[in-house]
Amino acid sequence: MAEDAQQHKDQVRRVFDTLAPVYDSPATRFFPFCADRLVSYVRPRPGSKVLDVATGTGVVAIAFAQAVRPGGRVTAVDISADMLDRAAANIGKMALDNVDLHQMDAERLDFRAGYFHSVVCSYGLFFLPDMAGALREWVRVLRPGGKLAFTSFETTAFQPMLDDFVARLQAFGVQLPDGPFGSQRIASPEHCRELLAEAGLSSIDVQNLQLGYHLRDENDWWEVITSTAMRALFEQVPVDRQDAFRQEHLGFVATQKNENGLWLDVQTRFASGVKAL
Ligand SMILES: C[S@@+](CC[C@H](N)C(=O)[O-])C[C@H]1O[C@@H](n2cnc3c(N)ncnc32)[C@H](O)[C@@H]1O
């Protein structure tokens, strides 16, 4: 593997190890909302074997583990040991005994070919240096006739707060990657289709769903930032300027509130394809 790809993965792992204690936040309740919608989208059969890639704290694994009972199992993998510890705790609270967790790189799965009835990944694909290679690897472990599905954010998600956040990071001297980064690496529904087709899948489907809701105010938005990968970007602001950044950014965000609170757009793409029989 190229050295910079490995460095990127190590960096992502460190970011999520740090986020693990605060990741399950009421402000980011779209993660479990999305997990439930993904179950309705994939419609796994009871008794089936599901792979949840980039499981994080396990919301998708939990939703699928309930759906495949009786007899089904979910295997869930993530690169971050601390996220997996949280997943184990969340699975324990739900008293589920049909989930197996493994620390594993999503691009190099240690499973045999054709094993899973479904492979799913929610808001994880865009963290991977080689998205096309990862999808090919997920197709390898999928049974013929099985469905692969992933979710990613649509370009309107978190706007207009996200654009202000990014512009302000640049104004405060944070060096952002050249070109698209984060979820913008998956540019459009057409790009989703291309990725799935290149991985060899057919019956390709891409749908948008709005999973948004009203936050109370700008402080809830700050919780969205600090409990997601956006936090790692904010932490690149020089420490002596972080208070000023927060105040200026939240000053803008406060202007976006109305009588219902602050709208959090979480327009999400659901994309899937089927492996040929
Ligand atoms: C935004 S979280 C999504 C977690 C979960 N799917 C959800 O919907 O809440 C992204 C997850 O991808 C994981 N991840 C990033 N790069 C990975 C890789 N190369 N292999 C496995 N997991 C990875 C992170 O550790 C993190 O838990």
Image: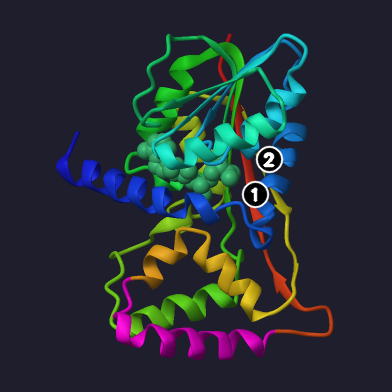
Is residue 191 something that shows in the picture?
A: no
Q: Is residue 276 left or right of residue 2?
A: right
Amino acid at circle 2: Ala
- Can residue 244 be found in the magenta stretch? yes
Amino acid at circle 1: Phe
Residue sitting at 66 percent across and 60 percent down? 266
In the rendered image, residue 23, in percent from the top left (x then y), is placed at 55, 53
- Can residue 74 be found in the magenta stretch? no
In the rendered image, residue 79, in percent from the top left (x then y), is placed at 39, 36
Between 94 and 108, the one lying in front of the other is 94
SS label for mark 1: helix
Q: Dot 1: within a 10 Å radius of its alpha carbon, few (fewer than 14), some, or many (20 or more) residues?
A: many
Residue sitting at 48 percent across and 35 percent down? 84
| Farthest right residue in view | 259
Asked if the residue under mark 1 is in contact with the one under mark 2, i.e. CB atoms within 8 Å, the reply is yes
Within 8 Å: ligand 1 and the Cβ of disc 2?
A: yes
In the rendered image, residue 196, in percent from the top left (x then y), is placed at 51, 33
Between 242 and 261, the one lying in front of the other is 242
Instruction: Give the magenta part as a residue range.
Output: 236-256
Q: For the N terminus, which image quadrant?
A: top left
Within 8 Å: ligand 1 and the Cβ of disc 1?
A: yes
Residue ID for mark 1? 31
Is residue 126 something that shows in the picture?
A: yes
Real-space Cα separation, disc 2 to disc 1, in angstroms: 6 Å
Q: Is residue 86 left or right of residue 12?
A: right
Residue sitting at 72 percent across and 21 percent down? 44
SS label for mark 2: helix
Q: Is residue 130 above or below residue 71?
A: below
In the rendered image, residue 85, in percent from the top left (x then y), is placed at 49, 36
Q: For the C terminus, which image quadrant?
A: top right
Q: Which mark is residue 35?
A: 2
Residue sitting at 43 percent across and 75 percent down? 166
